[in-house]
């Protein structure tokens, strides 16, 4: 089926530094999402993005978080500065419109 | 906001038995329903999606039932095999690429 690619698969970063998580969504998809999962637990919505804008964000999407997709390239999640509680697996997802939402394999972020 | 409850949190069955996972939701505007499978350390694999105008959908040994009156969604794995062992998540949304609300997951173990 359609593939959403996430790069890197693992990232270890010092607390306070900046990190950018990259997502290559399905090529013709228009809607993009980030979710956070801690220790294999519940998937928590962070943000969705369409036409260059954030459509909706949750309270987990702190001021230190930002998303963008410049010129149709990677859809990125930037955290600046990182905090220990940001350690989690971050999943990117994309969809075309009224259809199915496909998820990537996740990026495991460890903040030390 | 939407509240999704999923049960059971853990389910152990013998190979060849059926496994049933149930989710209930609260928002009557919910229009899009999906089931995902997550194997250990992996991403979310979309198993099946249904819209609110579908009561039943079967594919490759999986049956999804939707009872809109009771706001209940179920996944039935008929003749489960060890490769089905994973965490299963239900996911619902109002459609139109709104945020997805996930259940807490069901850890399914299929014993040979």
Image: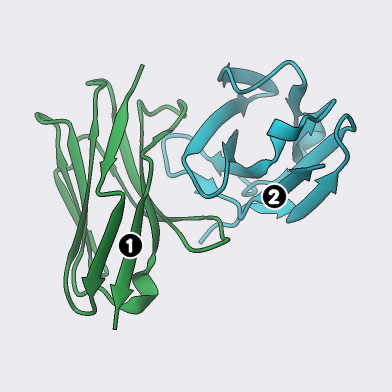
Crowding at mark 2 (Cα within 10 Å: few <14, some 14-19, many 20+):
many
Q: Position of residue B54 (x, y in %)?
A: 18, 42
Q: CA distance from mark 2 to mark 1?
A: 24 Å
Check the image and report above or below for B86 versus B110.
above
Q: Position of residue B93 (x, y in %)?
A: 37, 30
Q: Nearer the viewer, residue B68 or B8?
A: B8
Residue B7 seen: yes
Chain letter for the green colouring in the rendering:
B
Q: Quarter holding the N terminus of chain B?
A: top left
Chain letter for the cyan colouring in the rendering:
A
Q: Secondary structure at mark 2?
A: strand
Q: Which one is in front in this view, the residue at disc 2 or the one at disc 1?
A: 1
Q: Secondary structure at mark 1?
A: strand
- Residue at x 82% of width, y 38% of height: A20
For this orientation, the residue located farthest to the left is: B69
Q: Nearer the viewer, residue A1 or B46?
A: B46
Check the image and report above or below for B97 versus B16.
above
């Amino acid at each position: 089926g359609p593939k959403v690619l996430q790069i890197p698969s693992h990232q270890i970063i010092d607390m306070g530094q900046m990190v950018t998580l990259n997502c290559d969504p399905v090529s013709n998809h228009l809607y993009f999402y980030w979710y956070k999962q801690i220790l294999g637990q519940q998937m928590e919505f962070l943000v969705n993005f369409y036409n260059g804008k954030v459509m909706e964000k949750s309270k987990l999407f702190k001021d230190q978080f930002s998303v963008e997709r410049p010129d149709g390239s990677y859809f990125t999640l930037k955290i600046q500065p990182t905090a220990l509680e940001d350690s989690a697996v971050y999943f990117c997802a994309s969809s075309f419109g009224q259809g199915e939402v496909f998820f990537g394999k996740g990026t495991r972020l460890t903040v030390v | 906001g939407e509240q999704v409850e999923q049960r059971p949190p853990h389910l152990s069955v013998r190979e060849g038995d059926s496994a049933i996972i149930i989710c209930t939701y609260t928002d009557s505007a919910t229009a899009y329903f999906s089931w995902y499978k997550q194997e250990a350390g992996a991403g979310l694999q979309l198993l099946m999606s249904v819209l609110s105008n579908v009561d039943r959908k079967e594919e490759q040994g999986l049956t999804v039932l939707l009872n809109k009156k009771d706001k209940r969604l179920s996944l039935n794995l008929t003749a489960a095999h060890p490769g089905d062992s994973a965490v299963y998540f239900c996911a619902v949304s109002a459609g139109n690429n709104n945020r997805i609300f996930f259940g807490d997951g069901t850890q399914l173990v299929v014993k040979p």
